[in-house]
Each structure stands twice: as C-alpha cells, then as structure tokens.
C-alpha cells in the first residue's frame, strides 16, 4: 500500500480541523482587512503631510506679517516744512 492510501485509510472523517474553503476564506478576509488598514494608513499619512505643509505656510505668512508690522512700527513720517 502506498503512503497516501495508508493515510486515507487511517484518517477519521470526524477529525477536528479546517477545510480548504475555511482556510481560503480566512486568508481572503485577513487580506481584505490588511488592505483596508494599509489604505487607511496611507491616506492618513498623506493628510498629515498636507497639514504639515499648510501649517508651515501659515507660519511663514505670520512671520512675514510680523516683520512688516515691525517695519511699519519703526517707520518715521517726515513732514515737509510747509505742512508743519
């Protein structure tokens, strides 16, 4: 008898375990969950990068406005002699 026939002859049909369909379904569901998780992570990383860029632009604009404000505060107005 070949080893395959011996295995089939000694195998109990009520032996606990998973069928191929159950294993494939579990692999499929796990891969779907992982795909959604990775997609969510990538979207979140992209949103984070855009938020960082927007914050950097806002800080640069605020810095420029502060500098303009300081320059205007230090500006002296000279009046002509006729206007004084």
Image (spheres, helix red, strand yellow):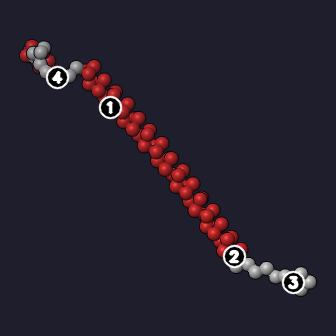
Q: Is residue 49 positioned above or below 70 on the image?
A: above
User: Can the viewer see residue 5?
Assistant: no
Density class for disc 4 (Cα within 10 Å; few <14, some 14-19, many ≥20) is few
Dot 1 corresponds to which residue? Answer: 30
* Disc 2 from disc 1: Cα separation: 64 Å
For mark 3, give the secondary structure. loop
For mark 4, give the secondary structure. loop
Answer left or right for 20 relative to 39.
Answer: left
Give percent across and percent down for residue 23. 26, 25
Give percent across and percent down for residue 34. 36, 36
Give percent across and percent down for residue 2. 11, 17
Dot 4 corresponds to which residue? Answer: 17
* Disc 3 from disc 2: Cα separation: 22 Å
Dot 3 corresponds to which residue? Answer: 84
For mark 2, give the secondary structure. helix
* Disc 4 from disc 1: Cα separation: 19 Å
Give percent across and percent down for residue 29. 33, 28
Circles 2 and 1: CB atoms closer than 8 Å: no
Q: Is residue 25 positioned above or below 46 on the image?
A: above
> Which one is closest to the eye, mark 4 or mark 2?
2
Density class for disc 3 (Cα within 10 Å; few <14, some 14-19, many ≥20) is few
> Foreground: 23 or 46?
46
Residue 73 — which label?
2
> Which one is closest to the eye, mark 3 or mark 1?
3
* Disc 4 from disc 2: Cα separation: 81 Å
> Foreground: 59 or 72?
72
> Which one is closest to the eye, mark 3 or mark 2?
3
Density class for disc 2 (Cα within 10 Å; few <14, some 14-19, many ≥20) is few
């Amino acid at each position: 008898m070949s080893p395959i026939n011996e295995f089939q002859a000694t195998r109990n049909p009520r032996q606990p375990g998973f069928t191929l369909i159950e294993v494939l379904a579990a692999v499929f569901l796990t891969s779907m969950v992982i795909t959604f998780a990775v997609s969510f992570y990538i979207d979140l990383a992209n949103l984070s990068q855009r938020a960082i860029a927007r914050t950097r632009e806002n800080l640069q604009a605020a810095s420029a406005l502060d500098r303009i404000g300081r320059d205007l505060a230090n500006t002296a107005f000279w009046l002509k002699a006729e206007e004084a």
